[in-house]
């Protein structure tokens, strides 16, 4: 079972930045497609950003131009750089790794954006 551990969440003011990290416990990290999702109170979980094993990325409209997903296969880690944060970005952010019929999730890290 692959374990994913997110870190880097916290409280930030509007306009601020955070970088989330997700470390994976697997020796074959490079085969996984990876994603960051978020869930705000009372809302469904939604995709924020996705990166394939070949490095292709895609973003939800809400994060385009503000968020950047990247991966470091040597460190088994995926990152989400978030800039120009808004109160609407407040949510629990989850890391996801999938490959064929495998789908793994982390426990989530809270991001709160408020003055």
Image (spheres, rainbow, N blue to C red):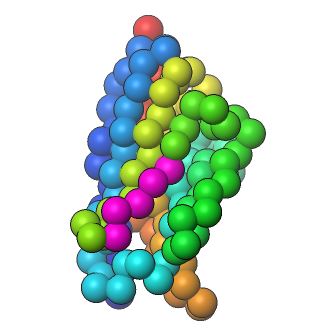
Q: Is residue 21 left or right of residue 67?
A: left
Helix, strand or loop: magenta stretch: strand
Q: Quadrant of the C terminus?
A: top left
Q: Is residue 13 left or right of residue 103?
A: left
Q: At 37% across and 45% down in the image, what residue appears?
A: 20
Q: Is residue 70 magenta?
A: yes
Residue 77: image location, x then y, percent: 33, 63
Q: Is residue 93 visible?
A: no
**Residue at the limit of the structure toward the bottom, as seen here:** 101
Q: Is residue 40 visible?
A: yes
Q: At 28% across and 85% down in the image, what residue appears?
A: 27
Question: Quarter of the image holding residue 100?
Answer: bottom right
Q: At 33% across and 51% down in the image, what residue appears?
A: 21
Q: Nearer the viewer, residue 76 or 108?
A: 76
**Residue at the limit of the structure toward the right, as seen here:** 61
Q: Is residue 43 above or below residue 37?
A: above
Question: Quarter of the image holding residue 13?
Answer: top left
Q: Is residue 11 left or right of residue 47?
A: left
Q: Is residue 84 above or below residue 53?
A: above
Q: Is residue 68 above or below residue 30?
A: above
Residue 89: image location, x then y, percent: 56, 31
Q: Is residue 72 above or below residue 93?
A: below
Q: Nearer the viewer, residue 7 or 59?
A: 59
Q: Is residue 5 magenta?
A: no
Residue 17: image location, x then y, percent: 41, 26
Q: Quadrant of the N terminus?
A: bottom left
Q: Magenta stretch?
A: 69-73
Q: At 30% across and 82% down in the image, what residue appears?
A: 26
Residue 97: image location, x then y, percent: 49, 72
């Amino acid at each position: 079972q692959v374990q994913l551990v997110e870190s880097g969440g916290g409280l930030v003011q509007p306009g601020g930045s955070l970088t989330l990290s997700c470390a994976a416990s697997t020796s074959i990290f490079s085969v996984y497609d990876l994603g960051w999702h978020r869930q705000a109170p009372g809302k469904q979980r939604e995709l924020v950003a996705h990166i394939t094993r070949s490095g292709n990325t895609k973003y939800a409209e809400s994060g385009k131009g503000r968020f950047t997903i990247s991966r470091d296969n040597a460190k088994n880690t995926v990152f989400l750089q978030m800039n120009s944060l808004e109160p609407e970005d407040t949510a629990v952010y989850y890391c996801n790794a999938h490959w064929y019929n495998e789908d793994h999730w982390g426990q989530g890290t809270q991001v709160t954006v408020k003055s």
